[in-house]
Image: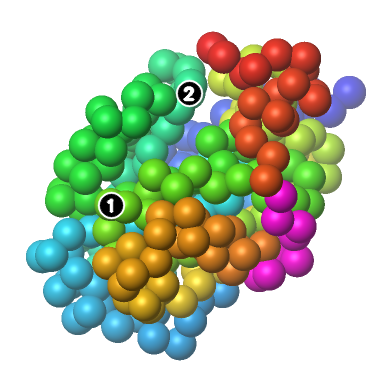
Amino acid sequence: MWIPFGIFLLLVRATVFFLLPYKLSILFLHFTGLRGTLIIPDDCRVSNELKQLSKEGGLLYVCNHRTLLDPVYLSMGLVQVRPPSLSLAAVTYSLSRVTELFAPIRTVRLIRNREKDSKMIEKQLQQGDLVICPEGTTCREPYLLRFSPLFAEKTDHIVPVAIDFHVSMFYGTTAGGYKSLDPVFLLMNPTSHCSLAILEKLPRSYTCKGGKSKFEVANHVQALIGKALNFECTSLTRKDKYMILAGNEGIV
């Protein structure tokens, strides 16, 4: 019974989001039921530090993966704490071309080739900030999948981000259905709440340049995000998830 109303609400939300600037669209989306909470460290608004980092290379925001719209919600949150002139791109994998076409932020597609993906991440960090979800797939249960350590080698400017969603009707993620419909169902919810916590930037001593291995860095970031969300950290991989839920390895 709700689906016709949900489709209308989806169209209204999407239209306003694309036509209005972020700060205006956030207010309207809040009015329509898409609410959120932003938690930031005390020194996150130091724009001079962010501008200096932009000259050395962008910040790498490492986020757990709840829905396909995680990078979009992060970009909306970052509007409140950083210079608007800094660009933000999102690393994607197996995202539908339709979703990429309508994405409000720039997307960078990885191909699961370690050497090529590594060079792509380095290139994007030279151009601006980048958000990556090292779990490799969405997970709607209260635990974190294993974090791929690829991101840990690329920069020592790493900012962990903890994100969680609470929806009223439709989950914004699927394991066996069409992934391109995930954002559609998420935005069709009568109400939803996104909790976004931008954590402290990793100190140099906890990065690869500070002497840690890439696995130690990845596990440390996973632990920080898990603690912030009160989620259980696991060693389950993307393939494990799909084998358990869909009976395949999640290969597109």
The mark that comes first in sequence, 1 or 2, is 2
- Which is nearer the eye, 174 or 121? 121
Amino acid beneath label 2 = Leu
Residue 110 found in image quarter: top left
Q: Residue furthest bottom?
A: 42
Which segment did they paint magenta? Answer: 227-234
Q: Residue at x 26, y 28 (%)?
A: 116
Amino acid beneath label 1 = Lys
Q: Position of residue 249 (x, y in %)?
A: 65, 17
Q: Is residue 100 visible?
A: no
Residue receiving disc 1: 154
Residue receiving disc 2: 95
Q: Is residue 243 above or below residue 197?
A: above
Q: Residue at x 10, y 65 (%)?
A: 55
Question: What colour scheme governs how the chains and residues are painted in the rendered image of this protein?
Answer: rainbow
Tell me the tag on residue 252: none
Q: Residue at x 31, y 72 (%)?
A: 210
Q: Position of residue 196 (x, y in %)?
A: 58, 63
Residue 62 found in image quarter: bottom left
Q: Is residue 52 above or below residue 233?
A: below
Specify whether 120 is left or right of 164.
left
Q: Residue furthest left?
A: 55
Q: Position of residue 28 (x, y in %)?
A: 55, 53
Residue 229 part of the magenta-drawn span: yes
Specify whether 190 is left or right of 31.
right
User: In the image, which is nearer the foreground, mark 1 or mark 2?
Assistant: 1
Q: Quadrant of the C terminus?
A: top right
- Which is nearer the eye, 98 or 3? 98
